[in-house]
Structure formats: structure tokens, C-alpha cells
Image: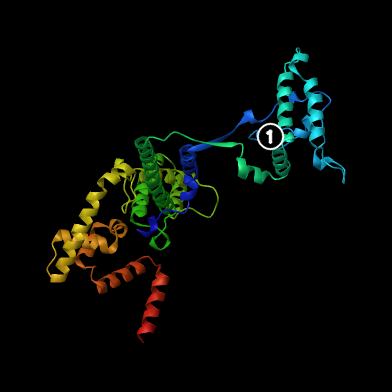
Amino acid sequence: MASHAPSSNLQRRFSPLVLLILLAFIPGAASWWFNADASLSDSPALVPANTTWGVFYDPKGIFCGSFDCYRILGLEAPHELPRGMLPPDTKVVTAAYRKMSRKWHPDKNGGDKLAKERFVKIAKAYEVLSSTETRKLYDYFRDRHDAYIQKYGSNVLWTYAPKSDVGGVVLFLFIILSILSYAMQKNKWSNVADHVVKAAYENLGPAHGGGRESAEVRESAMAELAEENNRAMEGKSGREKKAAIRLMNATKAGPGGGSGKTPQQERLHKLIVERVNKINDFGGGFHKPTIKDLLALKLVLLPYSISRYFYWSVRLFLKQKRGLDFTAEEVLILTKRTVGIVAWDAETDLGQADMLERELWVEENMKVWKREQELSTMSRTERKQAKREKADFNE
């Protein structure tokens, strides 16, 4: 049933559903998050008015935090000094420390709540700059943040979430995938249904995508439409009846090239849609979804399906090797496997009976049958062309 292959609008129909599933999985997939340690950043309120303590990259608080140790003591950093001017030595640092510590000693600033914190910062700055080794490191890390991170680490703390319950995660996945498999089966059926509606409404033949289902649906819909028209024409004049008959004949031929639909065509389309919606199974796996299409149930039945497939494969292989006759059930299974379930379901009862008689699992028989199928889907002109080509080839 080649005409029933799903159309290319699968991605368009499912893009919202796929997006929803992805959004559902993102929180579970991200099993960790990071939080910046806000306590490592110093409050700007510590800086006394009309002064500046500068900035420094020190998220771990090894030195003076986010402030510049030199600026805390009221000194200029080496990189700020004019060329040729030496950086402050230990005596200068000590003098600056004494001056600032006296100024911001908590005992002398009882009314200032930040005096104690400033005093602690001043003491830390002196501790860093008074030590030759520590001061050397401090100056080195000023413009080398990568070296600082390599030695002390960064201010980003990685925290792993608690382990998820494995059973809960598996159950969640089963539910999501089962819903997805159910929706995909629904979409497969809808694609075929849309195609049958189109083929029936436009009166398409096998060469243009029509099939047995579309022909039967159109025939049934046209019959009901004719009955409705007959009832509607009762009591009307001869001229009105002729006009209605012409309109009905135009409807039988299929839609015209115009963009709009006549009332008769609208009614025909509605009748076709009603009939197609009542078809639960188009064959070849294109059926309305049922509980059997849930992924969870499919996985439960998978061992049985696999064992059954291998059982029949071995059984048929051994019979073919020994040259034994096949039973009716074996012929049915062999034929279905040879032509495919889609082609088998697309055939009428007479067509299926013909398949069973022709032993299509034999290669030569299969070639002849395939050629016949190709010819059946061709138009009259295409069939004539194919016959001429075959005759020319034989000559």
C-alpha cells in the first residue's frame, strides 16, 4: 500500500511534542548546579567616604578580598607609580598601617558600626604587605587571574544534587516514551487518513496515489450524496432537477480548478471524512492507537515476539532445505514475509488468495508479481510505453 506511506509533515506535527519532552527531561539531566559564594565579595560600604580601596581579584580571601591591600593603607600600588619610582618599602608600609589603624581603631570610633571591620581589613593589608614572600605573591597575582585560580581555585562552588531514585527515573522514562509511542501511532494513522480523504475527494486513480480504500469511501459517499439529492429534488420543477443533476455530475468528476468548493463538494468532503474516521485499521501497521501501542506493553511482549519469529524462521528454513510441502499456515506466513505486511493488507481478499497460490517466495514468481504491480499503478499511456520498451528489448 505504497499510497499510504506517512507524509513528510511528521516533524511539523510533532515539533511541539518533542519540545515538551525535551523540557521535561532537562531538569533531570542537569544533576548538578553551581552557586557563587556571595560571602567572599566585600561590601562597598566598608570603604570610608572620599577614599577608594581599589579592586583586586581575590575570591578566596587569601589576601584582602576584593579590595587592594595598598589602597586600604592609603598607598599607591606598584603598577600605579610613575616610571622609575620605587614601590613602598616595609618602613613606609608600617607607617601607613599605624596611621590608618589609629584612625579606624574601634575604641576611637564607637559610633561607627563599620569601624571594626575596617580595622580588620587594615590589619590584613599590613599582614600581606609586611611579609616579603606574601607581598611578592600578591603583586604577581594582580594581573594573573589564571595563575591565581590554578593555585587557589575559583569562587564557583559545584554542588551535586542528591542521587535520583533509579526506579522513579525508569518509571518516568517509560511513561514519557509510552505517551510518545502512542502519539506517533496516532500520527501514522492520521497521515494515511488524510491521504485517503484527499484521494477519495479528488477521485484519484492508482497511478496518482489512489487505492482500494479511497475508491470504496468515495463510492459510499457519492451514493449517500445521491440519495440526499434525490430527496431534495422531490417536488421541484424539471429545470431545477436538471441543474441539480449537472451539479451532481460535476461533483462526480472531482473538484475543479477553482479555489472555492460548491455546497455539493463541501458535503461530499464531509461525508468522506466521516467514513474515513470510522476506519480503525488501514493495514500495514497504520491503525488507530490502542493499548498495544504503548512502549511498556511492547517491551513486555518483545521476548515472545522474538521467539515466535525465530521459531517460524527455523521451521520454514528446514522445510525448504528438505523440499517438504508447506502447510496452509506456513504458506500464509511465507507470503506475508515475502511481499511485506503493507502490500498484503492493501490487497483485496481475491488478491490475497492469488498471492497464496503463486508461491511468491520463489524468486522468479516474485519478479513477475512485482512487474504486474508496477503496471497496475501506471496510467494507460505509461503501460503502452512499457510494452513498447519490452518489445524493443526482446527484438
In the shown orientation, is residue 354 left or right of residue 256?
A: left
Residue lying farthest top?
111
Label 1 crowding class (10 Å Cα cut-off): few <14, some 14-19, many 20+? Answer: many
Task: Give the position of the C terminus as an image quadrant.
Answer: bottom left
Q: What amino acid type should be assigned to the residue bearing mark 1?
A: Phe
Q: Nearer the viewer, residue 176 or 125?
A: 125
Residue 170 in the image, given as x and y percentages of width and height: 36, 39
Quick check: can you spot residue 52? no
Residue 303 in the image, given as x and y percentages of width and height: 24, 50
Placement of 228 over or under 91, stated as above or below? below
Quick check: can you spot residue 133? yes
Residue on which the image places disc 1: 63
Residue 305 in the image, given as x and y percentages of width and height: 24, 51
In the shown orientation, is residue 191 left or right of residue 340?
A: right
Q: Nearer the viewer, residue 346 or 313?
A: 313
SS class, disc 1? loop
Residue 73 in the image, given as x and y percentages of width and height: 79, 30
Placement of 365 over or under 113, stated as above or below? below
Task: Identify the residue at horizontal 68%, vertical 34% (top origin).
Answer: 63
Q: Nearer the viewer, residue 5 or 14?
A: 14
Placement of 8 over or under 300, stated as above or below? below
Task: Identify the residue at horizontal 81%, vertical 33% (top origin).
Answer: 91
